[in-house]
Amino acid sequence: MSARQAVEQAYRDEWARLLALLVTRLRRFDVAEDSLQDAYAAAARVWPDQGVPQRPGAWLYTTAYRRALDRIRRAEADARRLPLLLTSPPSSFEDDNSDITDERLRLLFACCHPALRPDARAALMLRFVAGLTTAEIARLFLVSEPTMAARLTRAKAKMAVAGIPLRRPTADDLPERLDVVLAVLYLIFTEGYRATAGPDVVRPRLATEAIRLGYLVGELLPGEPRIVALLSLMLLQHARRDARVAPDGTLVLLPDQDRVHWHHDEIARGLALLDVLEATPMPGEYHLQALIAAEHVRAGTALQGPGFSMPSGGRAAGSSMAQEGPGFSVPSGGRAAGSSMAQEGPGFSVPSGGRAAGSSMAQEGPGFSVPSGGRAAGSSMAQEGPGFSVPSGGTGVGGGGARWPRIARLYAELERRTGSPVVRLNRAVAIAEAGSPEAALALLDGLDRALTGNHLLPAVRAELLVRLDRLDEAEAAFDQALALVRTEPEHAHLARRRAALRNP
Amino acid sequence: MQYALLIYGDEKAWEARDEREKQENHERHGRFMEMLRARGALVGGEELNNSASATTVRNGGVGVTDGPYAETAEQLGGFYLVEAADLDEAIALAKQVPEPIVEIRPVVAHPDM
């Protein structure tokens, strides 16, 4: 390994824990950060000539600590009013992880302090716990580097001036503080799937970072069921990332996704984590969401039978399990055939027109299904805010096999917990899929005020009205949704659906 | 560190309280201050008269005007000045203030003054 590679590897392996050590020992974020940067720069200069030290981490730590002391002394000499606080020689650098676990936990809770703004918490987590550079974080959040740098600087200043402590929360505070940590992780995760105007429809790297952080938090706080639940949820949603984007960069709706591109190993991991939680008496919100995601994924994976051809399904047939298989193709469906959501599978091909016409609840279209968490339209996330987002496993996934009544029950429980109107919307979709569009429509009553300006509500209402054959009202609802929708793919989808009303 | 715990609330609701409620509130604050004293955390604190009694001075601007700085439903009604190790400790104290809204502001130390 060359010296340059050694520096790079040390950056990957050691940066985050060295920073945690320095921050907690120096109690100064900015100084710790700059000094560690200096130490890596010094390594890049010195190691090629003098050779890679036996313990690169210890070398970097000692170098950074000395630089930090110099910086602090210089700053204090400039200020000429505070005594030297740090005169001790560098504390010893231990290679074992016993201490560092605690130091990283302290840093983690400081970055996720409730006194910080949610976007600042997410940025701080990525910078100080995940170890991303400011430039990387800026790219991930689609803001300019100076903007992100300013956001981080403000957050660090708030931490220092307000006296946000670097210590583990007390046992009393822990549940509440852990909620914030989990909300931050999930915010980072969902940010990666938010439909935006950016060049990339999805930014899986953010989701990957969130999952990595989730594992880290799980290691730091073992045996905490909420972390396990959140990890399971993220894994189950993220496992479908590669099937979500077409080669031209556009989103692929769930029914059109090729399950060959699902990461089945990750799905297996997500399901295994859920099994760990099986005995949990009162499932939490993330747990409920993970159970819903699991329903969709299980439906999607269990159904790949040998080529099976199905009668063009009416609504009734829609929920039978059998409708998929390799090579299966959806007959261009009329509205009636719509709910055969079976339209997924390897080798699946959709005749042109079939999707639009045949589409129904099942087809997770941007604008229709109330996705979140994960997919396409994600706009619900954006409106929900941290800690509230309501991912679903995808209203459309393999609806043929999904156990909709169970999904509807899970949503009902989730709604009871969160009171979220978006959850209720998801629940309505599940109830419609379970065969009761009238009941679903009734559930939408009273949501107008909570979801004012959100195109998803009229879009869902339109689809329900289509199922009830109330086409004039459906048309009006589509018009409402079209007036509100903000992203181009969603607009196109809704326009297609509206046009299909009269020309099935 | 020193923190100011600023107490905000709806003045109309404060003024609508009857004598018994006022007395009870007074006693709750008394107990809170006892607790602060026992911990050595009490630096100071006062109740403020209502915002109708406020006068705002805008130096260099429109000068002296009647009323509080911000015309909002919630007004500053009083404050405590407390000693706390860090924000978490200040939050723990603020949670024990017998009032609905408490803003925590770190006090700037001016050693030279």
Image (tube, rainbow, N blue to C red):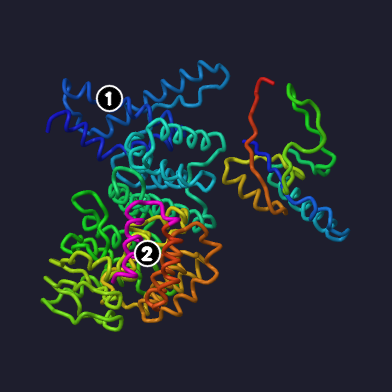
Part of the protein shown in magenta: A483-504
The residue that mark 1 highlights is: A41
Amino acid on which disc 2 is placed: Phe
Q: Main secondary structure of the magenta part?
A: helix
Horizontally, residue A61 falls left or right of residue B43, namely: left
Amino acid on which disc 1 is placed: Ala
Q: Which mark is residue A368?
A: 2
- In the picture, which quadrant includes the C terminus of chain A? bottom left
Mark 2, chain letter? A
Residue B57: image location, x then y, percent: 78, 28
Question: Which residue is more in the foreground, A207 or B73?
Answer: B73
Residue A178 shows in this picture: no
Task: Name the residue: 77% across, 51% down.
Answer: B29
Q: Secondary structure at mark 2?
A: loop
Task: Name the residue: 60% across, 46% down.
Answer: B89
Quarter-of-image position of residue B50: top right
Residue A415: image location, x then y, percent: 48, 70
Residue A428: image location, x then y, percent: 43, 73
Q: Assess whether residue A502 is covered by the magenta stretch.
A: yes
- Of marks 1 and 2, which one's residue comes earlier in the chain? 1
The correct choice, above or below, for A259 with respect to A66 in the image is below
Q: Secondary structure at mark 1?
A: helix
Question: Which residue is more in the foreground, B83 or A398?
Answer: A398
